[in-house]
Image: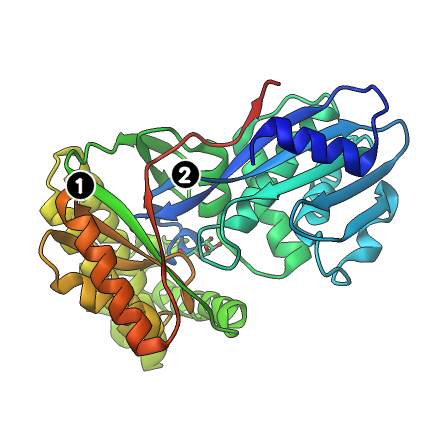
Amino acid sequence: MEIPELKKIFLDTFGDDGKELRAFEAPGRVNLIGEHIDYCGGCVLPMALGMKTTLIARRRRDNVLRLKATDLDVTVETDIEKIEELCGKLFWGEYQLGTALELIKDGYDLCGCDLLYHDTVPHGSGLSSSAATEVSTALALSKLSGKETDMIKLARISQMAEKNFVGVECGIMDQFASAMGKRGHAIFLDCKTLSYEYIPLDIDGYKIVITNTNVKHALGSSEYNERRRECREGLSGFMRAMSDISELSEVSPEAFEENKGLIKNLTTQKRVRHIVYECERVKLAAGALKSRDLALFGELMNKSHESLRDDYEVSCPELDFIVKEGQKLNGVLGVRMTGGGFGGCAVALVGGDAADNYIDRISRGYREKFSRDATFYITEAEDGAHEVFI
Ligand code: GLA
């Protein structure tokens, strides 16, 4: 749906009081490599997508926030002072209200607003529809309240919303990619310092193809928080030998091999092994992208998946099937799960001529094996969150 149509829905829903409508967009993201390491201080390599949340917003005279989505027959309405009372009680609207609450905690003096949301990021797919919702909300509310908007700060506020209101102890990657994406570029982001570099996606002749399993296994968020706990346990083990480290990302593969015996629990040891080697792979992948060594980039994607499947155990049969079958096909340089896992999407680097065959073969095989359809998106890197002037 384009903005003129959304404006019309907005006016039909909330009425026309003659006040100015403004439009904001924030994209979903796909992570090319560097999975489950953002919360361990690692570097990641996501890019913003064309799939996004579009938000039409208008200031109100009172202190009320009123929210509606184009695909849901629910309106959420609350006084700004009473947002916290709704925490955990809503069928829809938690990401938005959580973001409003975090803005307030950060000292933003929010004004009342009417907000209409339209999403094209598929929900529950691991492509960060939640980050798109949070970041678009943070941007709209801060702009309508007349505050200067530092996009990195808004990414942090959005991350806190997910953590405090929704209860997933996520890292910063998704919100950062949604806020800071750049057309034609991947973001090489150091999640410890938040320093970042845009790397041109010079993948001439290749395509980034996302396959959505269209499944989301229920364990997702509890296992996510459990992995974070295991990483903390692993970190305290390593700190006994390396007192100067503050994050697992600072453990080199050599230091890991030398000191891994300090971690008696073998499951925890596997988790840490994933973190340490994945951190290393991202650095190599960033170098490979800069030197246009796409074959190496693809190999690193494949290894990343293996580690997520065997050591970190966040994959699932549907993702493993897509990865295994995809890796067999001609013209496919690499395939891996992307995002939190337990369902969601796989991302593949596929030769332009091979993309149709990839889609055809995977879609048939997937349907035969799982009796459901996969969905495919051929994607390009797009800009991060911004106001659309209408
Ligand atoms: C989710 C989280 C991110 C990140 C990924 C895994 O998307 O929101 O912070 O941890 O999982 O890489």
**Residue projecting furthest to the bottom:** 265
**Image-based side of 26 in relation to 85, left or right:** left
105 and 309: which one is in front? Answer: 309
Residue 378 visible in the displayed image: yes
Residue lying at 63% horizontally and 61% vertically, measured from the top left: 167
Q: Split into 4 quadrants, where in the image is the C terminus?
A: top right
Residue picked out by circle 2 = 48
Residue lying at 62% horizontally and 26% vertically, measured from the top left: 4
**Image-based side of 12 in relation to 225, left or right:** right
Look at the numbered disc 1 and give the secondary structure of its residue.
strand
Q: Vertically, is 237 above or below 68?
A: below
Residue 270 visible in the displayed image: no
Q: Vertically, is 243 above or below 45?
A: below
Residue lying at 69% horizontally and 23% vertically, measured from the top left: 147
Disc 2, ligand 1: is the CB inside 8 Å? no
Residue picked out by circle 1 = 206
Q: Vertically, is 348 above or below 226?
A: above
Q: Which amino acid does label 2 sit on?
A: Ala
Look at the numbered disc 2 and give the secondary structure of its residue.
strand
Q: Residue 44, position in %: x, y?
A: 34, 46
Q: How many labels does the image show?
A: 2
Q: Residue 89, position in %: x, y?
A: 77, 63
Q: Which amino acid does label 1 sit on?
A: Tyr
